[in-house]
Image: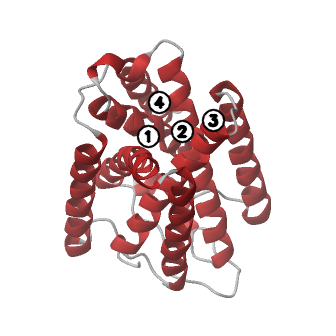
């Protein structure tokens, strides 16, 4: 799925119009997206372990608000600001799902469909208001608000879904295989005309979360839990370094922007 497939060329009638605020959908987009999901998973667990759940959630929430404030203040897409916001959504989205399960005792089998309902509601309100869910129409504050609400819901949903499969018999490695196969399905369905571009994009977007999180967990957790035992801190640092490297490359090359952005 490329940017051309999810482009929405209809004019936006809202007065405060900006350059599109979202990265172009390229191979780099999907690589960084998967990296942010894994980094968010292990970073959330690491912060909760080091700082305690309450302080970790509080600091994660403040960092999320700050990163989104910077993102909303800009009038065009800026790689470092956009991906910082995505990272913080990943961290906080993981915390939100974990708080429901660990803190409140809500089973993943309950939280997963609950987050799916939240995401569906966000999409419903977004489409009712804007008549499109295309990420290449994010040129007004209202659309940007809908976009980030959807992103936050996808991260919480993906976290719960990944934890659900990991605890019902698939394990981390099995979950990686499951979601790696699943993420190919919307791309193939779109390729052969069975699924339109926008729903194919959002389906794949949701699935990157449990894929990346399962991969990072498998790398971090101990052998007794079926993982490589590399540890939360090394995996978090390694994935963070990879994100920084890719984002720096995009900031210089601008391969993630359109000519009019």
At 29% from the left and 26% from the top, the residue drawn is 222
- The answer to whether residue 198 is seen in the rendering is no
Q: Position of residue 162 (x, y in %)?
A: 50, 30
The quadrant in which the N terminus is found is top left
Q: Secondary structure at mark 3?
A: helix
Q: Which residue is mark 1?
A: 208
In this rendering, the label closer to the viewer, 4 or 1:
1
At 33% from the left and 48% from the top, the residue drawn is 35
Give me the disc on residue 192. 4
Q: Return the disc, 1 or 2, that comes first in the chain's sequence.
A: 2
In this rendering, the label closer to the viewer, 4 or 3:
3
Judge from the rendering whether residue 256 lies leftward or rightward of residue 156; answer left or right: left
Judge from the rendering whether residue 59 lies leftward or rightward of residue 108; answer left or right: left
In this rendering, the label closer to the viewer, 1 or 2:
2
Is disc 3 in contact with disc 2, using a CB cutoff of under 8 Å?
Answer: no
Is disc 4 in contact with disc 1, using a CB cutoff of under 8 Å?
Answer: no
Q: Return the disc, 1 or 3, that comes first in the chain's sequence.
A: 3
Give 250 or 105, whichever is nearer the viewer: 105
Q: Secondary structure at mark 4?
A: loop
- The answer to whether residue 11 is seen in the rendering is yes
Q: Return the disc, 4 or 3, that comes first in the chain's sequence.
A: 3
């Amino acid at each position: 799925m490329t940017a051309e497939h999810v482009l929405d060329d209809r004019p936006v009638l809202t007065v405060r119009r900006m350059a599109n605020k979202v990265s172009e959908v390229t191979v780099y987009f999907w690589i960084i997206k998967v990296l942010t999901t894994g980094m968010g998973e292990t970073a959330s667990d690491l912060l909760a372990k080091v700082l305690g759940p309450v302080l970790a959630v509080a600091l994660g929430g403040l960092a999320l608000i700050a990163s989104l404030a910077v993102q909303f203040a800009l009038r065009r897409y800026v790689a470092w600001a956009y991906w910082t916001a995505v990272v913080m959504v990943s961290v906080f989205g993981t915390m939100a799902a974990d708080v429901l399960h660990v803190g409140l005792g809500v089973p993943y089998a309950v939280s997963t469909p609950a987050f799916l309902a939240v995401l569906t509601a966000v999409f419903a309100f977004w489409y009712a208001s804007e008549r499109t869910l295309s990420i290449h129409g994010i040129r007004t504050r209202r659309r940007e608000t809908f976009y980030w609400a959807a992103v936050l819901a996808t991260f919480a949903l993906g976290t719960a879904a990944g934890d659900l499969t990991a605890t019902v018999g698939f394990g981390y490695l099995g979950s990686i295989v499951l979601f790696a196969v699943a993420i190919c399905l919307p791309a193939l369905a779109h390729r052969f005309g069975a699924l339109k571009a926008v729903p194919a994009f959002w389906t794949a977007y949701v699935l990157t979360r449990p894929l990346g999180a399962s991969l990072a967990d498998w790398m971090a957790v101990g052998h007794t839990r079926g993982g490589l035992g590399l540890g939360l801190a090394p995996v978090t640092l390694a994935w963070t370094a990879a994100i920084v490297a890719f984002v720096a490359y995009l900031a210089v090359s601008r391969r993630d922007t359109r000519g009019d952005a």
